[in-house]
Image: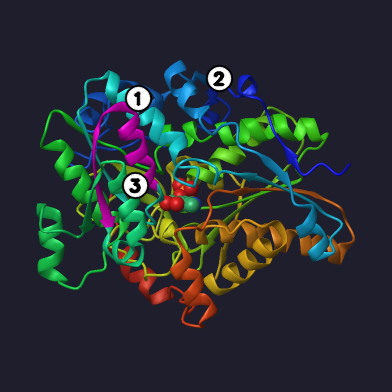
Amino acid sequence: MDIIKYTLSENQMPTAWYNIQADLPAPMPPVLHPGTRGLITGADLEPLFPSELIKQEVSIERWIEIPEEVQSIYRQWRPTPLYRARRLEKALDTPAKIYYKYEGTSPAGSHKPNTAIPQAYYNKIAGTKRLTTETGAGQWGSSLAVAGAFFGLEVVVYMVKVSYHQKPYRRAFMESYGASVIASPSNETESGRKILEQYPDSTGSLGIAISEAVEVAVQDDRTKYALGSVLNHVLLHQTVIGLEALAQLEQAGDYPDIIVGCTGGGSNFAGIAFPFMGNKLRGDRDIKFVAIEPAACPTLTKGKYAYDFGDTAHLTPLVKMHTLGSSFVPQGFHAGGLRYHGMAPLLSHVVELGLIEPKAYKQLDCFAAGLTFARAEGILPAPEANHAVKGAIDEALRCREEGIGKTILFNLCGHGHFDMQAYMDYEAGLLRDTEYSNQEIAMALAGLPVIA
Ligand SMILES: Cc1ncc(COP(=O)(O)O)c(C=O)c1O
């Protein structure tokens, strides 16, 4: 019998997250204070995050235990299945073996609850009453809304205005769990009002929404801020994906030659890749890691590796990352979760160490790949995940040309059930490819902070 799904039982779910910082050949550059530009301290971060998350942010321990309360909620949908894409392999007529880890089975439909649950948990035990956050595609806001409902926390989501209008059902989803959703830029914050004065028609950006959420959090002791990607502790929580995939591939008697994922802020990619990368760094088999980003927001392929702010109003700490500049407002293309000006410092660092090959794809090619996948495998991917699908298909087609049967693993990080407007626009020929010009890049990068 040809096995399609590799599943683990609940008692085979990982009980610790993997921290790649323990295995890095070079330490990460330090995080700097946005005002003094000196080294940041844990105390500087306390208005934003509970102490357990701050500890995880700087930890170099290889394994960090997943609290039982978090594990028991993970078990609502984890372990997630690993599929062997036999029907896609056949459709592509490739000698490659293609596996995908499917994170769309979570309550929000993506990988994002893997970190929303522990973030809400650590906040709850620290006495936090309210969480503020940003959301692009709505996946992260949905995940935090679910987590807030589980732990009895109030959740306020600043949703990038273009997505707020493109995705009304995501908004309704968040509100169903009791969250408040505000279109960003809004008139409710100083940062939002400043943007609206200058650009009354602003469609918003993740950078602006982050500024609004951070501003509200720092003004109230009982409110903290939660981020859906980029930070070390977020990437850490996502490693449950790769750890499960390792065990599932062992069941299949396989090991990947190539791992592919899409990158917005870097968390789902790190989640699937880091446990395997850790093996490689500790001397195990070599793997090619391919990170796919949108050509319209080419952070890794065209951005600069430099210190920058995580938000537009410059309220966040300064981190060294691949960036297009914090003033960059990406076009309203449909993979809303990939429209961020920066990249996780940890992923950026690993790219600088030469461990990852980044690539940029145009959205029309990604939608076409997503439909090929859906018609073969039956799952309609999120527009973000289509980037990974296209990356995996390209690798499989290369195998066909070269006549080599490599093993490809990719992360199908979410389903596209709330993205039907995007698919309708694609089918109607209304979507356009936009590329970010070198001139625009130069302009955005000209505003990077100067660090002595
Ligand atoms: C389905 C999906 N995939 C990918 C991303 C990008 O984020 P990250 O790179 O942190 O996984 C998002 C972000 O919202 C998302 O919703």
The quadrant in which residue 28 appears is top left
Please say whether residue 321 is one of the residues in the magenta stretch: no
User: x, y (%) of residue 137?
Assistant: 39, 56
Distance in Å between CA atoms under marks 3 and 2: 26 Å
- Amino acid type shown at disc 2: Thr
**Viewer-closest of 240 and 80:** 80
Q: Which residue is mark 3?
A: 141
- Amino acid type shown at disc 3: Gly
Q: Which residue is mark 2?
A: 15
Please say whether residue 151 is one of the residues in the magenta stretch: yes
Q: Secondary structure at mark 3?
A: helix
Q: Residue at x 44, y 67 (%)?
A: 334
- Is disc 3 surrounded by few (<14), some (14 to 19) or many (20+) residues within 10 Å? many
Q: Which residue is mark 1?
A: 121
- Is disc 2 surrounded by few (<14), some (14 to 19) or many (20+) residues within 10 Å? some
Q: Quadrant of the C terminus?
A: top left
Q: Residue at x 55, y 30 (%)?
A: 20
Q: Closer to the N terminus: mark 3 or mark 2?
A: 2
